[in-house]
Amino acid sequence: MMTRALRTTPLWILYAFLYIPIAVVVFMSFNASDSPYTWTGFSLQWYPALLQDADIMGGLRTTLIVAVGTTIISVILGTLLAFALERYFPSRFLDAAAAAPAVMPDIMLAVGLLAFYTLVGFTLGPVSVILAHSVFGIAFVAAVVRVRLSGLDPSLEEASRDLGASSLKTFWSVTLPGIRPAILAGALLAFTLSLDEFTVAYFTASPADPTLPIVIYSSVRFGVTPQVNALATLLLLVSFVAVLLAQRTARLSDSLRGRNT
Amino acid sequence: MDSGDVLLDISGVSRSFGDVRALDDVSIQIRENEFFALLGPSGCGKTTLLRVIAGFEQPDSGTVTLDGVDLLPIPPEKRAVNLMFQSYALFPHMTVERNVGYGLACERLPRDEISSRVDEVLTTVGLTDKRNALPKTLSGGQRQRVALARAIVKRPRLLLLDEPLSALDRKIRGEMQMELKRLQHEVGITFVVVTHDQDEAMSLADRVAVMDRGVVRQLDTPLDLYRRPRSIFVADFIGNSTILRGRFDQGTWIGDSAPGLSVPDTCRDAIALALRPEALTIVPTDDPRARVRGEIVEVFFQGDHALAQLRADGTVYLAVLRDDVLPRRGDPRGLAWDESAPIPLFEE
């Protein structure tokens, strides 16, 4: 018992390191005090206060529009890109070029996009942010779908053709169900990445229509308000649920696939 | 063709992948209702030929006709040919019933006809109680039956089976072998099975094409392949045999070893002789019938018989032993065989 406790201690220290900042935010969101640094008592007042805050609600609306738009574009184009790379244009260079936007420094992408939008005279707004976020969203979806696609038994599609299905029917009833978990995982990834993305959004959003992270940033420049803690706690809850959902779909699909098929 | 109508006519088919000639001028005629086997080691081109027939591969040259109709321009989904994949390729997200009915649904048949034909074929393979099961919950043998049911439910003119038994363990393999044979009689479909397992080919098929490096080396009934292999390759690949290279000289075989074996005139143009283990008899060294003498290298007990290796003049012979008392390693023994036992081989 003793050695087991000793062995797991580093693990708990590591988890503490990861979660203490989050715990502080959650804890302070229930603070009755106006000051974000001193605890005066328990209160839920900051949660209803959020709903009253026009800036935050406006930012939330924009962010949701952007995240949904980004998810739709990323899933469709990312899946198509995964097919192109896996099936039709196998090339190391194209592979690397497809993955690069996912690992590229955000600030570089942001500056480049702003310059591009200015150059072509594109009006900044939710659409410009959606397109900007789709740049890395597509890269993530393509990467996730591609792995799944390469693991798909090619004889499944051939069996479908052999049994008389057209290529379209084969795609719809065999290929798509086979990669569905990856598409779902990619969608969740694109959605959550867009949801809290700051740098690119800061450069490509219109000042009249900021996304939630930008609203938060503007409001904490002059000190953290307890309201922001409440908001962060809610966002945390949303991402936590998203992660759990992603894990569940992955597990479900694995058990559906079975080990030998 | 001596009997039966030609169903599938493969004529002069070649296919190369880069420098590798997977199929080199292959011509095979397969008859209606025949159980045909393509047998060969991996890389011999048998799978490529199967994929050409199924429509997943186009040959560089040659023709393939089914019932006299050119098959090559027809896409796989329109061919009256179905393939049972080596991996079975069951759709993991569909139940047994939907897997089997998939091909019929593609034909847009009415729902009740699909369901009655699926019923019928599930009864044939004995899986009616598994209709709502997902493939992952089935055993290997059951999966194979589903794959088979799915392939025959469309009543193809020709059923292709890619290594049908290789994924099964030994005991089930024997059962499925008999099952396949029964099914073929029952449904009256021409079967073409691809396999690297000579036992499988020999026990299932009416005729076997032995392939090696893209070429058909010999096409015969299993019995003739065993009794009259034409080449060293076939003699070696099918069954066990001892190969004696050498040349014929006035009724004697001049080999690297055992000079002066007397052989019949049928061996005149041979480049090697094959001796089947059951044609050899192990005798005491002083037995006048002994044609060669040497010592026992190893004895393999097989249950109803034993196999013994005997080294004589640098050649290791393999012989069947039917005695109750087995010789031991190092025992001196002689080997006897009938004058007609050596099989002449004319090609490498």
Image (cartoon, coloured by chain):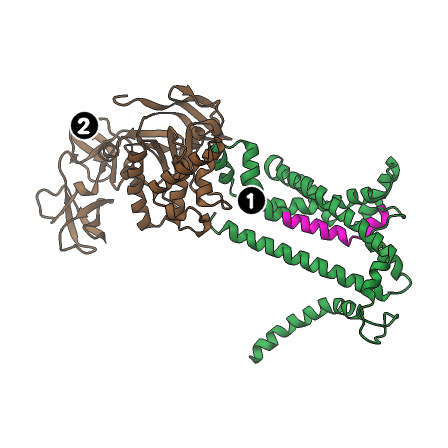
Chain colours: A green, B brown
The N terminus of chain A: image quadrant: bottom right
Residue A202 among those drawn in magenta: yes
Q: Main secondary structure of the magenta part?
A: helix
- Please name whichever residue, B262 or B11, is drawn nearer the observer in this view of the structure: B11
Q: Residue at x 20, y 40 (%)?
A: B258
Q: Which chain is home to disc 1? A: A
- Please name whichever residue, B84 or A43, is drawn nearer the observer in this view of the structure: A43
Instruction: State which region is magenta.
Output: A184-204
State the residue position of label 1.
A178
The numbered dot on residue B153 is: none
Which residue appears farthest toward the bottom when viewing the image?
A2
* Residue count near mark 1 (Cα–Cα under 10 Å), binned few <14, some 14–19, many ≥20: many
Q: Is residue B59 visible?
A: yes
Q: Position of residue B117 (x, y in %)?
A: 39, 36
State the residue position of label 2.
B266
Q: Which chain is home to disc 2? A: B
Q: Amino acid at mark 1?
A: Gly
